[in-house]
Amino acid sequence: MEKVYMALAAALAVGLSAVATAWAQSKIGAAGAGTLAEKPELSATIIILVAIPETMVILGFVVAITILTL
Amino acid sequence: MIARMAKIEIIGPNELLMAVLAQLRELGVFQIEQDITCFVGAGEGEAEKVRSALLDEKALAEKIFYEDLRGRIDELFACLPKAEIRASYLDPAGLLDSIIATVQRHGVTCREWCRKKETLQKELVELSGYAVILGAVEPVLCTLSPKSGIDFIGVTIRDPAALEEVMRLLTTLTQGKFEILTVKAADGTLIGLITLEKELAEKVRKTLGDQRVPELTFPETFAHLAFPEKIRYLRTRMDEVTAELDAIDGELTRFTQRWGAIYARVRSWLDERLGIYRNMAYLHQTGMCFFIHGWTPEAEVARLDEAVTAKFRGEVVVEKKQVLEQDLDLVPVALRNPPYFRPFELFARLLPLPRYASLDPTPFIAVCFPLFFGMILGDAGYGVILLGLALVLGRVFRRRDTVRDVARILLICSCYTILFGIFYGEFFGEAGARLLGWEEALIVERREAIVPMLFFALSVGLAHILLGLVLGFVTALKRKTGREALYKLATIVVILCLLALFLSYQEIFPRLLAKPLTLMLLFLIPVLFFAGGVLAPLELLKTIGNIVSYARIMAIGLASVLLARVANRFAGMTGNVALGLLLAVLFHAINIVLGVFSPTIHALRLHYVEFYSKFMAPGGRKFEPLHKDESNMNGNRRM
């Protein structure tokens, strides 16, 4: 039973953080696309802004690995 | 690296001003400084004696003349087609009177050609629209004899839903004795051709008019002709118009080939002259002499001095001044890197330039970016494909600077990908490696060793962030901001203490160290507050988050290797060699595309967000020296 809880916890750690990342990226991506249409020179800034929320899912992934292995 | 710049003042008699400016453009190493506050000394009344340089009457007349000629040449080029033109070595200075007369004459001719071309193109478009309609009904018309008692009505039905309404109306009027053929026009409206008995035609025309279904009208030139003749007329006229258009295009191309190079050279010469006049606004003079203030790379000072002294025989003086601390924000930034690092300036240019007294991140990104890329993708097979792609890109686009730089970056990254592929024992996933006889990974099998890979990625992150903090410390010392330097140093020590504490709890370091390390951390917290302000602990947490962020190197790498595995499994499941091969190629192609984009974006992000924030001081001004336009002198080009 403990293993099931651990697997569920790991899945939640990755799944919820992935949903949060996706939601944040959808908002930033849409705004970024609008910005690029007007100022193409900001492409590097937009790439950074879109990539920033990915830290959440990476942290979720690390937490999941910690739950399952350590 | 950021090139060292020298602060230069050029002084000479007023009458030599234009010649000196032309010489500076020729040399292409001097940027004029608009803000002279850092040049004009503190001597009393000195600033009042120096005023902005003004154009005299002759220079002003010349400027207006050049602008007018430039406008006329632009108008002429607007009429000409885009074509490859040869280089011209004409010196327009002595031929301006002939050029202005010729450009006027050619302008009239070309404008007339363009007007005629526009009219013919308009007519062709109009005729093409009718040709679509008449072409569709031609087969029906050919089968009918002129004495068949049949008439035709063309109608325009704007709303396709109204077609049924029209058909109902026609059924009532003709008792079903009609046929309707519809064609969709280019603008989406329906064109209908109604075939019916001649005696009913007038009645139907009137009723359709009352119901606001407009009858299709033809231009006057062929409105009076019968339908079959209309088709013949259309075809003949379209052929004639096309031939006329071809003739005009031929004339324009011949004209471009003959005169394009000359006019492009004159335009370039005019741009140079007008550029000199534009720069006049940033120059200064007194009653007798002029001052040009600006910047030049330290390495070019001797060449600039020699060239000016030789040309003006000592009448113009080039003086190197001391760069003061308050000038640092004004000094323009020029990046000068060795050939291996140079393509990576592309990444540095995507963000604002670093300030003059800070560090150029290019060498660091040139070393770490390919390393991260290789660590993430890490597959020898993919690396070989990327290597081939980089070589092809570099060869095909060798004249386009940006693409050539991208190809070079890809070449270096592909080498690292092959290297890490060998370390990880991957060649199109593990299946390909087995085919090559690599039974085991050279160093680590990353799909199995998840936790070791995670610690490896975090270690890389720790090293990278510590490097960033050390660079930040050095930059702060260079900029003489002691408090910031202390904050960076304290952060480095705190992170090292935390690491040692973690290792001692893991019993890698002696447990005895835990207590002194904790005490040291307690001592460092007030130092952090003092140097970094109230938000310092938050910043420290952010830095630790930055290190954890490097876990993406392992996470994305794992995703990549698992995708390759999926590709091989799917291919194996088909049971058919050809189909399996096709599927494997397809999946691996998708993985390669993902494998190029994903590591690029994440490796860049690790630099831009995690690494740069530790030492970069953005806000540098790009070094933009006066220079000649070389584009018209370097062989053929597209106009």
Image (cartoon, coloured by chain):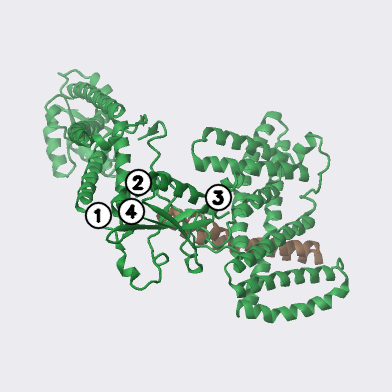
Chain colours: A brown, B green
Q: Is residue B31 left or right of residue B288?
A: right
Q: Are marks 3 and 4 in contact (CB under 8 Å)?
A: no
Label 3 and label 2 in one chain: yes
Q: Nearer the viewer, mark 4 or mark 1?
A: 1
Pick the residue in front: B631 or A29. B631
Residue B607 lies, with reference to residue B192, above or below; the image says below
Looking at the image, which residue is at 49% across and 36% down? B399
Lower position in the chain sequence, tag 3 or tag 2: 2
- SS under mark 3: loop
Residues packed near mark 2 inside 10 Å, few (<14), some (14 to 19) or many (20 plus): some
- Residue B22's label in the rendered image is 2
Asked whether the beta carbons under mark 2 and mark 4 sit within 8 Å of each other, the answer is: no
At label 4, counting other C-alpha atoms closer than 10 Å, the crowd grade (few under 14, some 14-19, many 20 or more) is: some
Q: How far separated are the C-alphas under marks 3 and 1?
A: 37 Å
Along the viewing direction, whichever of B481 and B370 lies nearer the viewer: B481
Label 3 to label 2: alpha-carbon separation: 26 Å
Q: Which residue is mark 1?
A: B55
Label 2 sits on a secondary structure element that is helix
> In percent of the image, x 65 and y 35: which residue is there?
B585
Labels 2 and 4: the sequence-earlier one:
2
> Is tag 3's residue or tag 4's residue first in the polypeptide sequence?
4
Q: CA distance from mark 2 to mark 1?
A: 15 Å
Q: Which mark is residue B336?
A: 3
Do the residues at discs 2 and 4 belong to one chain? yes
Q: Nearer the viewer, mark 3 or mark 1?
A: 1
Which residue is drawn at the image coordinates 71% and 62% (left, top)? B462
**Secondary structure found at label 4:** helix
Residue at 75% across / 77% down in the picture?
B521
